[in-house]
Image (cartoon, rainbow, N blue to C red):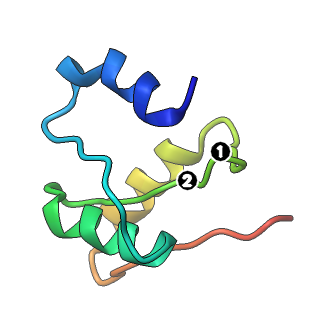
Amino acid sequence: MVSAEIIREYATHFTYFVSEPDRGQTHALKKGFARATGDILGWLCSDDLLDVGTVRFVLDYFRGHPEVEFMYGTHM
C-alpha cells in the first residue's frame, strides 16, 4: 500500500489532503506549509523518529521563549 492510499483511509481526520506531482521534497513542504494553520508547524520525514517528550519540550520551549521563531534538531 502506498502512502496516498493509507492517508485516504484516514482522510476524515484531515482538514485537507492532496496527492499530486511536485518538484521534489522542498516544493511539497512549501505547498503544505502554505496551507497550514496554527502557531507551531513541523514535519518528520518517513525515516525520522521523535524521542519521548520531544513535543512537550518544543511546546514548553516556545511558550517560555516567545522571541524564538524556529527550532531544529540533530541526531545525537
Badge 2 or badge 1: first in the primary sequence: 2
> In the picture shown, does residue 73 fall above or below 69?
above
Relative to 51, is 34 on the left or the right?
A: left
Residue, far front: 21
**Where residue 76 sits: x, y (%)?**
86, 64
Question: For this rendering, which residue is in front, 34 or 56?
Answer: 34
Describe the element under mark 1 as helix, strand or loop: loop
State if disc 1 and disc 2 touch (CB < 8 Å): yes
Relative to 23, is 12 on the left or the right?
A: left
The quadrant of the picture occupied by the N terminus is top right
* Residue ID at (39%, 52%): 59
**Where residue 12 sits: x, y (%)?**
18, 18
> In the picture shown, does residue 34 fall above or below 35?
below
Describe the element under mark 2 as helix, strand or loop: loop
Q: Amino acid at mark 1?
A: Leu
Question: For this rendering, which residue is in front, 2 or 67?
Answer: 2
Question: For this rendering, which residue is in front, 51 or 14?
Answer: 14
State the residue position of label 2: 44
**Where residue 32 sits: x, y (%)?**
27, 61
Residue, far right: 76
Task: Work out how far the residue at label 2 is from the one at label 1, CA to CA, in angstroms.
Answer: 8 Å
* Residue ID at (33%, 81%): 69
**Where residue 47 sits: x, y (%)?**
72, 48
Identify the image quadrant of residue 34. bottom left
Asked if one can make out residue 26 in the rendered structure from this viewpoint, the answer is yes
State the residue position of label 1: 50
Q: Amino acid at mark 2?
A: Leu
Numbered circle sitting on residue 60? none
Mark 1 is surrounded, within 10 Å at the Cα level, by few (under 14), some (14 to 19) or many (20 or more) other residues, namely few
Mark 2 is surrounded, within 10 Å at the Cα level, by few (under 14), some (14 to 19) or many (20 or more) other residues, namely few
Asked if one can make out residue 65 in the rendered structure from this viewpoint, the answer is no
Identify the image quadrant of residue 4. top left
